[in-house]
Amino acid sequence: MPTIPLDLDGYTDLPAGRIANVVTYLEKTVSPQALPAPGVSLYRTRSLRSPSNAWYRAIYRRVGERWLWFERAILDDARLAVWLTAPTTEILALEHDGETVGFAELDWSLAGNVEVAMFGVVAKVTGKGAAAFLMERVHARAQEEGVGRIWLHTCTFDHPAAVPFYRRAGFTPYKFAIEVTPDPRLTGHLPREAGPHVALIESK
């Protein structure tokens, strides 16, 4: 992959067909104290191991396409299946009235830690307590497994309330990164109308 010099004190022009966003990494220490028993909720979670590619792609697109999620979209079926069937991968499916309305993708591969590799809910339950309920279940799973740290990352393409939400959930930002990638709308991995908040610039 070609490289370009990055100006750390100014602007860096990107090659045609590339997009960039600023990534924020956040972490949270897991308290050994048990969480309060959950009250009555409209939502429930279901732990999935080795879900089908079709099921995963459907919820991934429903949650993430509007925010230009592409990390899993660019994987072919074979590579996606390897990831989903790994013993260290767990999906917490968020359900409401029998419908999957969000998910948290957990990676247990690093001892003492759990990475929330993907996290989100569909538009119709945004702002209705769904994400908070799902994050509580992530924390509970971390306690059950005895890990001491939960970490994740979000980016400037994501929902503008993402960082404030994670901070309210007890996460602390600890690192920034710049991610430069081919625009998945130009490579055909996402529809051209995906991520309307991110300009689509035609390659010349």
Image: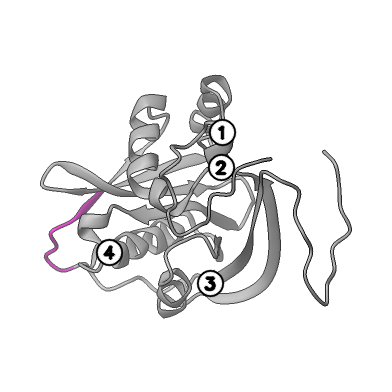
N-term mark: 2 or 4: 2
Residue kind at label 4, given as amino acid type = Phe
Classify residue 185 as left or right of residue 49: right
The residue that mark 2 highlights is 71
The residue that mark 1 highlights is 74
The residue that mark 3 highlights is 28
Q: Give the range drawn in magenta.
A: 39-45
Classify residue 84 as left or right of residue 203: left
> Do the numbered discs 2 and 1 sit on residues whose CB atoms are within 8 Å?
yes
The residue that mark 4 highlights is 133
Work out whether residue 45 or residue 161 is closer to the camera in this orientation and state it. 161
Residue at point 41%, 46% (across, down)? 65
N-term mark: 4 or 3: 3
N-term mark: 4 or 1: 1
Residue at point 49%, 32% (across, down)? 84
* Distance of label 4 from label 3 (alpha carbons): 17 Å
